[in-house]
Amino acid sequence: MTYSIGQVAKRLGLTTHTLRYYDKEGLLPSVHKSSSGLRIFTEKDLEWLIIIECLKGCGMHLKDIKHYIDMCMQGDSTIAERLAMFKKQKEHLALQMEQLQAHMEKIDYKIAYYTEAAKRGSIDAVQYNKCLMKEKERIFGQTIKKLTEEA
Amino acid sequence: MTYSIGQVAKRLGLTTHTLRYYDKEGLLPSVHKSSSGLRIFTEKDLEWLIIIECLKGCGMHLKDIKHYIDMCMQGDSTIAERLAMFKKQKEHLALQMEQLQAHMEKIDYKIAYYTEAAKRGSIDAVQYNKCLMKEKERIFGQTIKKLTEEA
DNA sequence: TACTTACTTAAAGTTTACTTTAAGGCTAAC
DNA sequence: GTTAGCCTTAAAGTAAACTTTAAGTAAGTA
């Protein structure tokens, strides 16, 4: 089973321009061309693209993704480096997840805050909800206290 | 307790340039100036900055963050819209976390893959580990199968 | 045959969020 | 009195990942 550039683009939510751009940048070394010059994508190529999207989604730059792909092309001598790269990305990803979790706490607080404000009819009145004020202290207190202590 | 621009920059991991840039862009309407023109940051301003960092970390653009801040300045008439904004951000954030989780699965697979390759001494030999091949199917199979079916 | 989809090169344009440069001036602390 | 840190405006520069434009060609499908 093979796919045209248009089919792949549609399914992965990219444009054909982007796929050609990736190809030009050396990110798709395994994509072959038909006798008439059309790009032919195999399932292996789709796997590559899925990994590219994954690494991009982790915040890796295209040039670093290219470096990884170059290593793959080089063969078994780069196995250790590739393993190290993914281990590093895992740590990075774990950090990102922690940060998103911290953001989520703040956003949940703000939702509670504005829900209370909507109920009471004004921002000023929210302070009378002691429970919310404690929550605020819990979420903002740490960061701000650190600032105060070291100032 | 108040802080200078330099103190705030240091603590929040920003530069003084960036803080002045934010100020210029209207993101820090509550920062006042001393008689000699120095910016004076209060704890309230730090809270603002923490929220700005949070929204930025969620992928929101500065101009949308500014819109939020403008709403805050407008007062109680915008409470409903602000609540809606945070609810939307929560959904967005939940999606992001799901995606990171999906990325993590792929990265864990790659770590297992290259660990096995390192152990066996070659990429080619990895395919003999049936367990890994099943894992690969589980992780890549779905996405690729969807492609195949609808092609 | 007409239409859709694909191909090429090469350069210019876009967006976001800064960062840098320039050039000069004020003020608080040591 | 000098140094460190702060201030101003205004414009130019940077990086990343595309996107767009131009201009022409070729192959496969209804």
Image (cartoon, coloured by chain):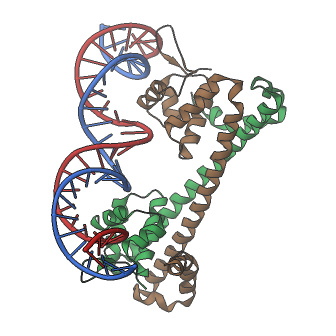
Chain colours: A brown, B green, C blue, D red
Does A102 appear above or below B104?
below
Q: Quadrant of the C terminus of chain B?
A: top right
Q: Is residue B123 visible?
A: yes
* Residue B148 spot, x, y in % from top left: 62, 28
Question: Residue A135: which quarter of the image?
Answer: bottom right
Does A108 appear above or below A132?
above
Does C24 appear above or below A20?
below
* Residue A77 spot, x, y in % from top left: 70, 26
Q: Is residue B141 visible?
A: no
Q: Quadrant of the N terminus of chain B?
A: bottom left
**In the visual, does A91 lie left or right of A144?**
right
Residue drawn 55% across the image and 35% down it: A65
Question: Residue A85: which quarter of the image?
Answer: top right
Q: Nearer the viewer, residue B14 or B147?
A: B14
Q: Nearer the viewer, residue C2 or A105?
A: A105
Residue drawn 67% across the image and 37% down it: B142
Q: Nearer the viewer, residue B136 or D3?
A: D3
The count of marks equals: 0
Q: Nearer the viewer, residue A74 or D5?
A: D5
Does A50 appear above or below C15?
above
* Residue C30 spot, x, y in % from top left: 40, 79
